[in-house]
Image (cartoon, rainbow, N blue to C red):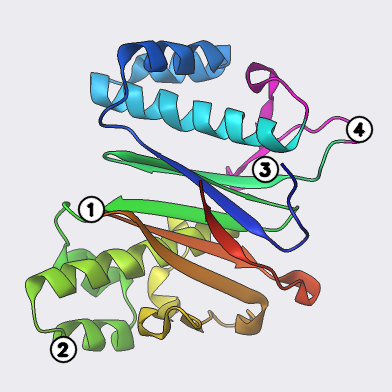
Amino acid sequence: MTLSAGDVHVWWQTTDDVGERAIGQAVALLSPDEHARYMRFMFDRDRRTFALAHALLRTTLSRYAAIDPAAWEFREAKGGKPFALLPAGAPRLSFNLSHTDGLVACALADGLHVGVDVESLTREASDEVAERCFAPRELEVRRTLATEADRTRRFFELWTLKEAYVKAIGAGLAHPLDTIAFTPDQVPEAIGFDAPAGVDASGWQFALFQPTDRHVLAVAVERTGGRAGAITLKP
């Protein structure tokens, strides 16, 4: 496949119904380091999710570059964000990976800073976490929502958008999340973004998706140099 400049492709897979043969094939793609991390998980469900997430990353990258999925090598940049070692002549691919209960996802871009986060809507939405991590305007809007289901959905919409952003910049959760504010109600035209001090909000694009009836997925991509593009959920 090809990836146009400025575009982001998001590949995803549900994990609940994956059979043992597919799990074995996923484990076989892992590097020795990844396999060691896989073995350190205490619970089988967590091991399965880890293997499927990293196999999805490898097979997705191989859709865009003529490299065997098992042959990809990765390193970590400052801050811990992974990147792929690309041979000469390979497309300039950047990526981000996320997983939650029942879903794994990988976002791929043409060298742009990109982040993806997925969460299960069946998890508990913590008011304590919201008070600590959401901006005052986000908290105010969330309190006005009529039902608990709406408040839960808004919690995970905001949380995934924030995580996608901090993953895109390689900062992780050390970044103060209450300095970032989103207005998901503007979907699909645009998601309102109040950037932290010193960040140009116009240089960022965000998207929210619901790939299944119980998952929400957010993508953040830095639009350096005005490189407009589309964020597309695949397949």
Residue at the farthest left position: 147
Q: Which of pointers 4 and 1 lies earlier in the amino acid sequence?
A: 4
Tag 4: amino acid = Ala
Q: Which mark is residue 88?
A: 4
CB-based contact (under 8 Å), mark 1 and mark 3:
no
Q: Which mark is residue 214?
A: 1
Residue at 43%, 53% (x, y): give it: 117
Residue 35: percent from left, percent from top: 48, 14
Tag 1: amino acid = Arg
Residue 218 shows in the view: yes
Q: Up-down: is 169 above or below 104?
A: below
Q: Which residue is mark 3?
A: 77
Q: Which of pointers 3 and 4 lies earlier in the amino acid sequence?
A: 3
Q: Which of pointers 3 and 2 lies earlier in the amino acid sequence?
A: 3
The magenta-colored residue range is 66-89
Tag 3: amino acid = Ala
